[in-house]
Image: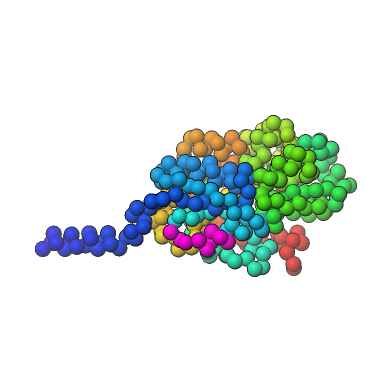
Amino acid sequence: MIRTIIALLALAGLAAAPAEAQIYPARPITVIVPFAAGGPTDIIARIVGEHMSKTLGQQLVVENVTGAGGTTGITRGAAAKNDGYTIMMGHMGTHGAAPALYPALKYDPTKDFESIGMAAGTPILIVARKNFPPKDLKEFVTYAKAQNDKLNQAHAGIGSVSHTTCTMLNVQLGIKPTQVAYSGTGPALNDMIGGQVDFMCDQIVNLTEQVKAGTIKAYAVAMAERSPALPDVPTTKEAGLPDFQVTAWNALFAPKDTPKDIVAKLADALDKALDDPTTKKRLLDLGGVVPDKQGRTPAALTALVKAEVARWTPILKVAGAVAP
Ligand code: ASP
Protein backbone atom coordinates (compact mmCIF):
# COMPACT_ATOMS: atom_id res chain seq x y z
CA MET A 1 0.00 0.00 0.00
CA ILE A 2 2.70 2.45 1.08
CA ARG A 3 4.73 1.47 -1.97
CA THR A 4 1.77 2.15 -4.22
CA ILE A 5 1.30 5.58 -2.66
CA ILE A 6 4.99 6.39 -3.12
CA ALA A 7 4.83 5.20 -6.72
CA LEU A 8 1.74 7.32 -7.35
CA LEU A 9 3.35 10.36 -5.72
CA ALA A 10 6.46 9.87 -7.86
CA LEU A 11 4.33 9.68 -10.99
CA ALA A 12 2.39 12.77 -9.95
CA GLY A 13 5.69 14.58 -9.38
CA LEU A 14 6.89 13.73 -12.83
CA ALA A 15 3.62 14.74 -14.37
CA ALA A 16 3.78 18.08 -12.51
CA ALA A 17 7.20 19.01 -13.94
CA PRO A 18 6.68 20.60 -17.37
CA ALA A 19 7.53 18.02 -20.00
CA GLU A 20 9.45 20.63 -21.99
CA ALA A 21 11.79 21.42 -19.09
CA GLN A 22 12.64 17.76 -18.57
CA ILE A 23 14.15 17.45 -21.99
CA TYR A 24 15.20 21.06 -22.46
CA PRO A 25 16.97 21.92 -24.64
CA ALA A 26 15.91 19.47 -27.32
CA ARG A 27 16.83 21.73 -30.23
CA PRO A 28 19.01 24.80 -30.96
CA ILE A 29 18.40 28.00 -29.00
CA THR A 30 18.17 31.33 -30.83
CA VAL A 31 20.01 34.23 -29.22
CA ILE A 32 18.72 37.53 -30.56
CA VAL A 33 21.55 40.05 -30.81
CA PRO A 34 19.92 43.43 -31.36
CA PHE A 35 22.91 44.89 -33.24
CA ALA A 36 24.94 44.06 -36.34
CA ALA A 37 27.31 41.10 -36.53
CA GLY A 38 30.89 41.82 -35.52
CA GLY A 39 30.05 44.48 -32.89
CA PRO A 40 30.47 44.20 -29.13
CA THR A 41 27.07 42.67 -28.31
CA ASP A 42 27.56 40.11 -31.06
CA ILE A 43 31.13 39.33 -29.98
CA ILE A 44 30.10 38.71 -26.36
CA ALA A 45 27.08 36.62 -27.38
CA ARG A 46 29.23 34.43 -29.60
CA ILE A 47 31.99 33.96 -27.01
CA VAL A 48 29.72 32.95 -24.12
CA GLY A 49 27.30 31.18 -26.47
CA GLU A 50 30.00 28.85 -27.72
CA HIS A 51 30.66 27.47 -24.24
CA MET A 52 26.99 27.50 -23.22
CA SER A 53 26.29 25.29 -26.26
CA LYS A 54 28.70 22.69 -24.88
CA THR A 55 27.03 22.67 -21.46
CA LEU A 56 23.51 22.56 -22.86
CA GLY A 57 24.26 20.04 -25.60
CA GLN A 58 22.55 22.24 -28.19
CA GLN A 59 23.79 25.09 -30.35
CA LEU A 60 23.10 28.68 -29.37
CA VAL A 61 22.49 30.32 -32.73
CA VAL A 62 22.92 34.08 -32.96
CA GLU A 63 20.30 36.00 -34.92
CA ASN A 64 21.14 39.67 -35.53
CA VAL A 65 17.89 41.67 -35.45
CA THR A 66 18.94 45.30 -35.77
CA GLY A 67 17.30 48.71 -35.63
CA ALA A 68 16.22 51.54 -33.33
CA GLY A 69 19.23 51.35 -31.00
CA GLY A 70 18.66 47.68 -30.26
CA THR A 71 15.00 48.05 -29.32
CA THR A 72 13.74 46.31 -32.50
CA GLY A 73 15.51 43.06 -31.60
CA ILE A 74 14.56 43.22 -27.95
CA THR A 75 10.92 43.93 -28.84
CA ARG A 76 11.00 40.79 -30.98
CA GLY A 77 12.62 38.81 -28.16
CA ALA A 78 10.15 40.02 -25.55
CA ALA A 79 7.25 38.83 -27.72
CA ALA A 80 8.84 35.45 -28.55
CA LYS A 81 7.44 32.19 -27.23
CA ASN A 82 8.65 31.81 -23.65
CA ASP A 83 9.84 28.22 -24.02
CA GLY A 84 13.58 28.81 -23.65
CA TYR A 85 14.26 28.52 -27.38
CA THR A 86 14.51 32.27 -27.89
CA ILE A 87 16.64 34.37 -25.59
CA MET A 88 18.40 37.69 -26.15
CA MET A 89 21.56 39.61 -25.39
CA GLY A 90 20.50 42.98 -24.03
CA HIS A 91 22.67 45.78 -22.72
CA MET A 92 22.80 49.05 -20.84
CA GLY A 93 20.97 50.75 -23.72
CA THR A 94 18.16 48.29 -24.45
CA HIS A 95 17.54 47.60 -20.76
CA GLY A 96 18.59 50.91 -19.21
CA ALA A 97 18.39 53.97 -21.43
CA ALA A 98 15.68 52.93 -23.90
CA PRO A 99 12.58 53.74 -21.79
CA ALA A 100 13.74 57.34 -21.40
CA LEU A 101 14.24 57.76 -25.14
CA TYR A 102 11.37 55.77 -26.63
CA PRO A 103 8.01 56.88 -25.17
CA ALA A 104 6.23 54.19 -27.24
CA LEU A 105 8.65 51.41 -26.30
CA LYS A 106 6.79 48.08 -26.56
CA TYR A 107 8.57 46.46 -23.60
CA ASP A 108 9.35 47.35 -20.03
CA PRO A 109 12.90 46.25 -19.14
CA THR A 110 11.89 45.87 -15.49
CA LYS A 111 8.79 43.73 -16.12
CA ASP A 112 8.84 41.87 -19.41
CA PHE A 113 11.88 39.59 -19.01
CA GLU A 114 13.37 36.82 -16.95
CA SER A 115 16.97 37.61 -16.11
CA ILE A 116 19.48 34.92 -17.03
CA GLY A 117 22.61 36.81 -16.05
CA MET A 118 25.31 39.34 -16.82
CA ALA A 119 27.78 38.18 -19.47
CA ALA A 120 30.37 40.97 -19.34
CA GLY A 121 31.05 44.51 -18.26
CA THR A 122 32.40 46.65 -21.07
CA PRO A 123 34.34 49.83 -20.29
CA ILE A 124 33.83 52.69 -22.74
CA LEU A 125 36.64 54.02 -24.88
CA ILE A 126 36.79 57.31 -26.77
CA VAL A 127 38.22 56.41 -30.18
CA ALA A 128 38.81 58.18 -33.49
CA ARG A 129 39.94 57.48 -37.03
CA LYS A 130 43.68 57.05 -37.10
CA ASN A 131 44.42 60.25 -39.00
CA PHE A 132 42.18 62.42 -36.79
CA PRO A 133 44.45 65.36 -35.90
CA PRO A 134 44.37 65.45 -32.05
CA LYS A 135 47.08 63.26 -30.58
CA ASP A 136 45.79 62.99 -27.01
CA LEU A 137 42.60 63.61 -25.03
CA LYS A 138 43.50 67.21 -24.14
CA GLU A 139 44.00 68.05 -27.81
CA PHE A 140 40.82 66.15 -28.65
CA VAL A 141 38.84 68.36 -26.26
CA THR A 142 40.25 71.59 -27.74
CA TYR A 143 39.85 70.37 -31.31
CA ALA A 144 36.30 69.08 -30.77
CA LYS A 145 35.22 72.41 -29.25
CA ALA A 146 36.74 74.32 -32.15
CA GLN A 147 35.35 72.05 -34.89
CA ASN A 148 32.07 71.28 -33.10
CA ASP A 149 29.33 70.49 -35.64
CA LYS A 150 31.86 69.93 -38.42
CA LEU A 151 32.74 66.63 -36.74
CA ASN A 152 31.03 63.29 -37.36
CA GLN A 153 30.30 60.99 -34.49
CA ALA A 154 29.17 57.41 -35.08
CA HIS A 155 26.69 55.54 -32.92
CA ALA A 156 24.52 52.44 -33.05
CA GLY A 157 21.12 54.16 -32.97
CA ILE A 158 19.20 56.26 -30.46
CA GLY A 159 19.49 54.74 -26.99
CA SER A 160 22.43 52.50 -27.86
CA VAL A 161 25.45 52.57 -25.57
CA SER A 162 27.52 54.45 -28.11
CA HIS A 163 24.75 57.04 -28.42
CA THR A 164 24.05 57.57 -24.72
CA THR A 165 27.66 57.59 -23.58
CA CYS A 166 28.80 59.98 -26.31
CA THR A 167 25.76 62.13 -25.51
CA MET A 168 27.22 62.45 -22.00
CA LEU A 169 30.60 63.34 -23.49
CA ASN A 170 29.16 65.88 -25.94
CA VAL A 171 27.25 67.60 -23.13
CA GLN A 172 30.40 67.82 -21.03
CA LEU A 173 32.31 69.33 -23.94
CA GLY A 174 29.41 71.53 -25.07
CA ILE A 175 29.62 70.21 -28.65
CA LYS A 176 27.03 69.04 -31.16
CA PRO A 177 28.76 66.83 -33.71
CA THR A 178 26.82 65.44 -36.67
CA GLN A 179 25.62 62.04 -35.54
CA VAL A 180 25.78 59.11 -37.90
CA ALA A 181 23.61 56.13 -36.95
CA TYR A 182 24.59 52.56 -37.78
CA SER A 183 22.97 49.20 -37.14
CA GLY A 184 25.75 48.49 -34.66
CA THR A 185 29.23 49.70 -33.83
CA GLY A 186 30.72 46.81 -35.84
CA PRO A 187 29.87 48.58 -39.13
CA ALA A 188 30.61 51.97 -37.50
CA LEU A 189 34.10 50.73 -36.69
CA ASN A 190 34.61 49.63 -40.30
CA ASP A 191 33.76 53.14 -41.47
CA MET A 192 36.08 54.62 -38.85
CA ILE A 193 38.91 52.40 -40.09
CA GLY A 194 38.06 53.62 -43.60
CA GLY A 195 38.25 57.22 -42.38
CA GLN A 196 34.57 58.06 -43.02
CA VAL A 197 33.69 58.95 -39.42
CA ASP A 198 35.70 60.97 -36.93
CA PHE A 199 35.04 59.56 -33.49
CA MET A 200 32.80 57.46 -31.26
CA CYS A 201 32.39 56.16 -27.74
CA ASP A 202 32.19 52.40 -27.77
CA GLN A 203 32.44 49.24 -25.74
CA ILE A 204 36.05 48.13 -25.44
CA VAL A 205 35.56 44.55 -26.70
CA ASN A 206 34.85 45.93 -30.17
CA LEU A 207 38.00 48.05 -30.21
CA THR A 208 40.94 46.38 -28.50
CA GLU A 209 42.30 44.58 -31.53
CA GLN A 210 42.02 47.62 -33.81
CA VAL A 211 43.63 49.93 -31.24
CA LYS A 212 46.50 47.45 -30.89
CA ALA A 213 46.84 47.19 -34.66
CA GLY A 214 46.88 50.99 -34.97
CA THR A 215 43.98 51.13 -37.44
CA ILE A 216 42.14 53.54 -35.08
CA LYS A 217 43.35 55.67 -32.18
CA ALA A 218 42.12 55.52 -28.59
CA TYR A 219 42.18 58.68 -26.47
CA ALA A 220 41.05 57.31 -23.15
CA VAL A 221 39.16 54.63 -21.30
CA ALA A 222 36.29 56.09 -19.25
CA MET A 223 37.23 54.35 -15.99
CA ALA A 224 39.16 55.06 -12.84
CA GLU A 225 41.72 52.34 -13.68
CA ARG A 226 43.38 51.48 -16.98
CA SER A 227 42.17 48.37 -18.76
CA PRO A 228 44.64 45.47 -18.54
CA ALA A 229 43.77 44.73 -22.19
CA LEU A 230 45.06 48.14 -23.33
CA PRO A 231 47.53 49.22 -20.65
CA ASP A 232 48.91 52.08 -22.78
CA VAL A 233 45.57 53.86 -23.07
CA PRO A 234 45.17 56.42 -20.26
CA THR A 235 42.04 56.77 -18.17
CA THR A 236 39.84 59.83 -18.62
CA LYS A 237 40.91 60.78 -15.10
CA GLU A 238 44.60 60.76 -16.04
CA ALA A 239 44.02 62.39 -19.41
CA GLY A 240 42.07 65.39 -18.15
CA LEU A 241 38.36 64.51 -18.36
CA PRO A 242 37.75 62.97 -14.90
CA ASP A 243 33.98 63.45 -14.96
CA PHE A 244 33.54 61.25 -18.00
CA GLN A 245 33.37 57.80 -16.46
CA VAL A 246 31.05 55.11 -17.70
CA THR A 247 31.09 51.34 -18.08
CA ALA A 248 28.48 49.43 -20.01
CA TRP A 249 27.34 45.83 -19.73
CA ASN A 250 25.80 43.02 -21.77
CA ALA A 251 23.46 40.45 -20.31
CA LEU A 252 21.19 37.56 -21.29
CA PHE A 253 17.43 37.73 -20.88
CA ALA A 254 14.53 35.38 -21.63
CA PRO A 255 10.95 36.41 -22.37
CA LYS A 256 8.73 36.85 -19.31
CA ASP A 257 7.42 33.68 -17.70
CA THR A 258 9.94 31.40 -19.33
CA PRO A 259 9.74 28.39 -16.95
CA LYS A 260 11.99 28.80 -13.90
CA ASP A 261 13.85 25.53 -14.40
CA ILE A 262 14.69 26.51 -17.96
CA VAL A 263 15.99 29.91 -16.84
CA ALA A 264 18.01 28.11 -14.14
CA LYS A 265 19.58 25.82 -16.78
CA LEU A 266 20.52 28.80 -18.92
CA ALA A 267 21.91 30.70 -15.91
CA ASP A 268 23.95 27.66 -14.93
CA ALA A 269 25.34 27.35 -18.48
CA LEU A 270 26.29 31.05 -18.44
CA ASP A 271 27.96 30.63 -15.04
CA LYS A 272 29.97 27.67 -16.35
CA ALA A 273 30.97 29.62 -19.46
CA LEU A 274 32.29 32.48 -17.35
CA ASP A 275 34.21 30.02 -15.15
CA ASP A 276 35.78 28.35 -18.17
CA PRO A 277 39.41 29.55 -18.45
CA THR A 278 39.38 29.79 -22.27
CA THR A 279 36.09 31.69 -22.45
CA LYS A 280 37.16 33.96 -19.62
CA LYS A 281 40.49 34.69 -21.29
CA ARG A 282 38.81 35.57 -24.59
CA LEU A 283 36.63 38.13 -22.81
CA LEU A 284 39.49 39.51 -20.71
CA ASP A 285 41.85 39.77 -23.70
CA LEU A 286 39.29 42.02 -25.39
CA GLY A 287 38.99 44.18 -22.25
CA GLY A 288 35.71 42.69 -21.01
CA VAL A 289 35.09 42.60 -17.27
CA VAL A 290 33.94 39.15 -16.18
CA PRO A 291 31.30 39.42 -13.45
CA ASP A 292 32.00 37.59 -10.18
CA LYS A 293 29.73 34.72 -9.08
CA GLN A 294 27.27 37.01 -7.33
CA GLY A 295 27.29 39.59 -10.13
CA ARG A 296 26.24 37.04 -12.75
CA THR A 297 23.14 35.71 -10.93
CA PRO A 298 19.65 36.37 -12.30
CA ALA A 299 18.79 38.29 -9.11
CA ALA A 300 21.77 40.62 -9.51
CA LEU A 301 20.77 41.35 -13.11
CA THR A 302 17.15 42.08 -12.18
CA ALA A 303 18.37 44.56 -9.55
CA LEU A 304 20.82 46.13 -12.02
CA VAL A 305 18.15 46.69 -14.68
CA LYS A 306 15.93 48.52 -12.16
CA ALA A 307 18.85 50.69 -11.06
CA GLU A 308 19.92 51.42 -14.65
CA VAL A 309 16.46 52.51 -15.82
CA ALA A 310 16.28 54.84 -12.81
CA ARG A 311 19.81 56.12 -13.44
CA TRP A 312 19.57 56.90 -17.15
CA THR A 313 16.30 58.84 -17.28
CA PRO A 314 17.63 61.92 -15.41
CA ILE A 315 21.02 61.77 -17.15
CA LEU A 316 19.39 61.84 -20.57
CA LYS A 317 17.00 64.62 -19.53
CA VAL A 318 19.91 66.78 -18.41
CA ALA A 319 21.64 65.96 -21.69
CA GLY A 320 18.62 67.27 -23.56
CA ALA A 321 18.15 63.90 -25.25
CA VAL A 322 14.69 63.63 -23.65
CA ALA A 323 11.98 66.27 -23.63
CA PRO A 324 11.88 67.80 -20.12
N1 ASP B 1 28.12 49.04 -29.15
C1 ASP B 1 26.77 49.12 -29.66
C2 ASP B 1 26.05 50.15 -28.89
O1 ASP B 1 26.44 51.24 -29.05
C3 ASP B 1 26.11 47.85 -29.71
C4 ASP B 1 26.67 46.90 -30.72
O2 ASP B 1 26.91 47.22 -31.88
O3 ASP B 1 26.82 45.79 -30.31
O4 ASP B 1 25.11 49.94 -28.18
Q: Residue furthest toward the left?
A: 1
Please tell me how many numbered marks the rendered image carries. 0
Picture quarter with the N terminus: bottom left
Q: Is residue 260 left or right of residue 17?
A: right
- On the image, the x and y values in percent for residue 220 come to 73, 40
What colouring style does the render use? rainbow
Report whether residue 238 is seen.
no
**Picture residue at 13% right of the left edge, 59% below the top:** 3
- On the image, the x and y values in percent for residue 221 come to 70, 41
- On the image, the x and y values in percent for residue 253 come to 51, 55
Q: Is residue 58 left or right of residue 139?
A: left
What range of the chain is rendered magenta?
Answer: 75-83
Q: Is residue 120 left or right of residue 263?
A: right
**Picture residue at 63% right of the left edge, 48% below the top:** 36
| 60 shown above or below 229 | below
Closest to the observer, 316 or 258: 258
**Picture residue at 71% right of the left edge, 60% below the top:** 316
| 66 shown above or below 257 | above
Residue 231, picture quadrant? top right
Q: Is residue 267 left or right of residue 173?
A: left
**Picture residue at 64% right of the left edge, 41% below the top:** 206
Q: Is residue 8 magenta?
A: no
| 239 shown above or below 108 | above
Residue 324, picture quadrant? bottom right
Report whether residue 193 is seen.
yes
- On the image, the x and y values in percent for residue 195 come to 78, 40
